[in-house]
Image (tube, grey):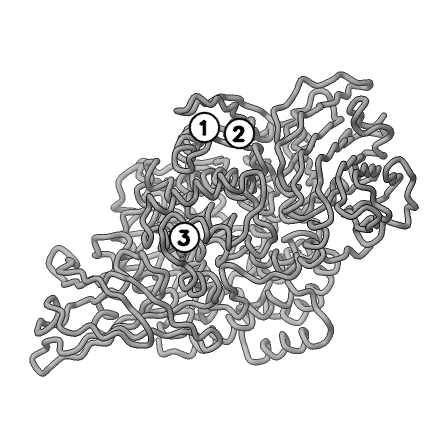
Amino acid sequence: MPVAEITRAETQQRAQLLHVRSYDVALDLTPGPPGNGARSGNDGPEGNAGSPGPDVFGSVSVIRFDCAEPGASSFADLVAEAVHEITLNGVPVDPAAWRHGRIALTGLAASNELRVVADCGYTSAGVGMHRSVDSADGKVYLYAKFEPAYARSVYACFEQPDLKATVSFHVTAPAHWTVLSNQPAPEPEPGPDGQAVWHFPPTPRVPTYVTTVVAGDYHLVRGTHTTASGQQIPLELACRASLAGHLDPEPVFEITRTGLDYYAALFGTGYPFAKYGQVFVPGFSAGATEDAGCVLVSEEFLFRSTVTDAMHLERAMVILHEMAHMWFGDLVTMRWWDDLWLNESFAEFCAYLALDEATRFTDAWPVFAVGRKSWGYQQDRLPSTHPVAADAPTLSEATANFDGISYAKGAAVLRQLAAYVGRDTFFAAIRAYFAAHGWANATLADFLSSVEAASGQSLDGWSKEWLETAGPNTLCAEIATGADGAVTRFAIRQEAPEQHPVLRSHRIAVGLYQRTADGLARTGQLQADVHGAETELAGLPELAGARQPDLVLLNDGDLGYTQVRFDPRSLATVCAAVGELPDPLSRAVCWNAAVDMVQQAELAMPAFLAMLAGGMRGESSVAMLAFLHGQAEQLMVQFADPRWVPTGRQQLAEAAVTLLESAAPGSDHQLAWAHLLGRTATSPGQLDLIGGLLEGSMSFPGLPVSVGLRWSLLLRLAAVGRAGEANIEAELAGDATDAGRRSAQACLAAMPDAGHKEAAWELLTGGRLDAESVTAIGRGFRLPEHAGLIAPYTGRYFAAMETIWAAGNGRMPTLITEMLFPHAAASAALLEQIGDFLAAAPRNLALARVLTERADIVRRALLSRALPG
């Protein structure tokens, strides 16, 4: 059954009409034959909750709500397999009232009670009520992921963020299961046939998308934390039983306690919920999600092997990001999804601020610059870019905006604003914002009003520049010198994309650097206010009459959200000596500029790889290295000529071998170089080395060749034909887990022959994989050096996407579309195929957006590949 779009206009009308008081939701999650239903007592849902089993579960929803205009009509939302009963104010409603994911409601009273009994379907897509069976032990795991609008696939509701209500869950499940939700778990009430019912107390007033239920054979660890104000917060940490041996609770609880203390002080209000739970869940469609008091986290952050500190930083960031949402999103919720940035930009900004100010991760802001801000820049360059405060008339358009603009660009802009009005003033405004809008909803105007009141400054112009217009600016240094080499003129030119010709005001630092025997040394730093197309900086004592520095670095320190370009002398210095810059934020500015130049066909891929191979040896932050290595891989997939990729990989591998041999035993850098070598080894000697590491015939003191590195090495050997199915099966025998099976499938997909590519294609397009599997297998399938093997799939790609989008759910279609896109076949013919496909029939807006973005990347890739090497 097609599901109707949720629109902003309709939700605005519904919000004006209705006030929702409460949801009482009974879910029957018993895995066997139909049970007796989930009951919640005299004033809760009653009767049979459907026919649960491996495909469906029973759902009974009782909604109590008021109507401002008695006699009016409205609708509730429900996506279900079957609806057994609908009653409104005790009167049966014709089942035909349920169509296209909506239940038509007519003749509403001033006070109403809607009761809906339905069978709802499990998913395997990491959204809705996800169900998976652990291949290690056959145990069942369920979790509900509702953002942005999947609560309606589990219980009847009013699916919009500004109709907040209290929510009570009553869950029938096997008595031995762990069952968790937003509120503390009660003692279960025993039932027949080994079942039990958990009656959770009502939540505070929250939007439906932050509610959840988690159920299954989860291993659960409890803790507690008392904040400085004396608030006692129960803590939960859970994961699959088969992964319990990998759960190290204390580091997670330590970051959790640190974050709770930090945010309570920063925001001036205590933690708003009754407990703080975190559950590592399988097959997740995101890194984590901010369900109130019960955060769902991807198992990628449950470390099964030795990892570098980069992964510990990323996990800490994810924990702090989702925790910030308890205030930004759960306590104060955007009115509609066009203000998604009020959730995501703030959570992103606060997470890195907390990392920097309250944890041991002193490289938080440089990592933000290279790992997240660069994502914002890349998204801002695409045809689909949009303002931070976006216009999203429909849910589909809003969902597409969960991107680098709403997260990273918004966070960077907020960091600028906090510096502009002053940190203390900024957070005084945030405390007033929470006080005014707690347990309610807010808009851009509400936020700006709070900051204006605290700072005494009008932010109308600032908002229009930074929140309400799209596209990045690029600042370019223009330097003229006399015959003696002395600087005679220095100006900063500002550019904007033709489609978004907005020139903004920037306050940046300009760093002046000279090369010395000890590396690049900063000899001066200027403060510059940039306005309009050109800003002349005349008469500066640091430059006027002085010899031109080896490097003039705009946005030194990376406070501004802007891309930069270099004068010729500075570009040569950066390419040769970026690793010599003493400040990691200055290095981050240079790395982001270089990546952007590759993407804009201004710097050839060979030049960038040479810059990386030379510059990474001076990088002290392993987390920054991890992101740079990831950037290099993405650029090779999307922009490099596939025929050149083996040369580029070998160049990185040569540097990795040298650095691995000289790394301190047991250091994070040693492990980082081993992983890089495992992804890039190409020459016979390099392949012999990683083969020896895998077999144990070669070793480096202090280097653990644990499960994660083993699979990385094996995938590379498989990709070059040095390992076959027998090797993969042997490795899987030692890691017979879901993660091990994903890794084995990725290795098979990476094998350089048509049969294994076809098997991977069938898996990826068959609709049976979760997001983690799609990502792993897709990376093996799409190796750019296998362009000849994957070229035949270009013709099949568009037909496959049509099928996938017709049957898809959640983010999965977008993920598959991106992972399978034939970047290696970039050509004018491919651009024509994209255009023909989009013109042939009306396409899903999200599909059209992804393909339009890919077409833009292809155009720039063709220009990049034509650059002289």
The CA span between labels 1 and 3 is 37 Å
**Residue at numbered disc 2:** 276
Of badges 2 and 1, nearer the viewer stands 2
Which disc, if any, is residue 253?
1
Q: Cβ–Cβ below 8 Å for labels 1 and 3?
A: no
Instruction: Tell me the crowding category of disc 3: few under 14, some 14 to 19, or many 20 or more residues within 10 angstroms, Cα based.
Output: some
Of badges 1 and 3, nearer the viewer stands 3
Mark 2 lies on a secondary structure that is strand
Q: Residue at x 66, y 72 (%)?
A: 795
Q: Quadrant of residue 549?
A: bottom left
Give the x, y percent position of residue 178.
65, 25
At label 1, the amino acid type is: Phe
Q: Is residue 19 left or right of residue 529?
A: right
Q: Cβ–Cβ below 8 Å for labels 2 and 1?
A: no
Q: Nearer the viewer, residue 589 or 478?
A: 478
Give the x, y percent position of residue 830.
59, 76
Instruction: Tell me the crowding category of disc 2: few under 14, some 14 to 19, or many 20 or more residues within 10 angstroms, Cα based.
Output: many
Q: Residue furthest bottom?
A: 483
Mark 3 lies on a secondary structure that is helix
Residue 436 to residue 585: above or below: above
Of badges 3 and 2, nearer the viewer stands 3
Residue 641 visible? The answer is yes
Q: Residue at x 61, y 53 (%)?
A: 336
Q: Nearer the viewer, residue 308 or 319?
A: 319
Q: Is residue 182 left or right of residue 405?
A: right
Query: Which label's residue is closer to the chain start, 3 or 2?
Result: 2
Residue 576 to residue 319: above or below: below
Residue 701 to residue 69: above or below: above
Residue 822 to residue 115: above or below: below
Q: Residue at x 63, y 36 (%)?
A: 205
Which disc, if any, is residue 452?
3
